[in-house]
Image: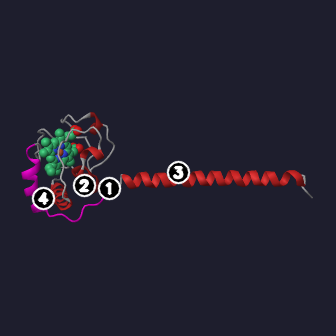
Amino acid sequence: MHLFPATTDRPRRIRLAACFALLTGGMLAAGLSHAQGNGAREWRSPPPGDVQRGATLYQARCSACHAVDSNKIGPAHRGVLGRRVGSLKGYTYSDEMAQSRLRWTPQTLNAWLQDPEELVTGQRMGFQVDDLQERADLIAYLATLK
Ligand code: HEC
């Protein structure tokens, strides 16, 4: 027994198939562009760092603006690893930092030190560390500030 007359059966199937192809194609395209978008913002893990070298670098490069336990031009650094970006009470961040929803991990710190503006557009730290190993050493040191 035919549910549909043979003449309308075929176009209906074709329409369904076309619909399905569009749907999966669209989902695939969305998935791909999403993956590409993430790739561009992918945070690289720093290599293992040396705490001693990091402490020396911190003194030389960061202490003009930062201290471990007090806010200067930049916020205090004790407990920075694991804390929400722009969240230390008593320090007035740029709006962009205060509104960021990121958290400080070795990966986000690496991205920040490499190019703060790339991580948080509109931020106010005009300083960056180009060398990957130096960033890793600094991050290893920051991780000891509990
Ligand atoms: C010229 C001054 C200056 C120097 C040098 C500097 N910073 Fe900063 N830093 C800032 C300012 C200002 C902010 C706050 C940015 C904002 O609110 O937009 C900041 C923010 C940060 C934050 C975010 C902390 C938080 O509470 O969210 C980290 C981490 C940081 N700096 C690490 C470093 C390290 C590590 C160095 C040395 C390699 C360094 N900074 C050198 C001025 C500086």
> Which residue is at 35% across, 55% downward?
42
Q: CA distance from mark 2 to mark 1?
A: 8 Å
Q: Is residue 58 magenta?
A: yes
Residue for badge 2: 110
Q: Earlier in the sequence, mark 2 or mark 4?
A: 4
Q: Secondary structure at mark 4?
A: helix
Is 134 rendered above or below residue 79?
Answer: below
Which one is nearer the viewer's eye here, 3 or 32? 32
Q: Name the residue carrying label 1.
A: 43
Q: Which mark is residue 54?
A: 4
Disc 1 crowd, CA 10 A, few/some/many (<14, 14-19, 20+): some
User: Where is residue 103 shown, x and y percent of the image?
Assistant: 30, 48
Element on which disc 3 rests = helix
Q: Is mark 3 within 8 Å of ligand 1?
A: no
Among numbered discs 4 and 1, the one appearing first in the sequence: 1
Q: Identify the secondary structure beneath mark 2.
A: helix
Residue closest to the far right:
1
Precedes in sequence: disc 2 or disc 1: 1
The region drawn magenta spans: 44-64
Examine the structure image and report whether residue 37 is included in the region drawn in magenta. Answer: no
Distance of label 3 from label 2 (alpha carbons): 29 Å
The label on residue 30 is 3
> Which of marks 1 and 3 precedes in the sequence?
3
Task: Decide if ligand 1 comes within 8 Å of the CB at mark 2.
Answer: no
Q: Work out which quarter of the rendered image holds the N terminus and state it.
A: bottom right
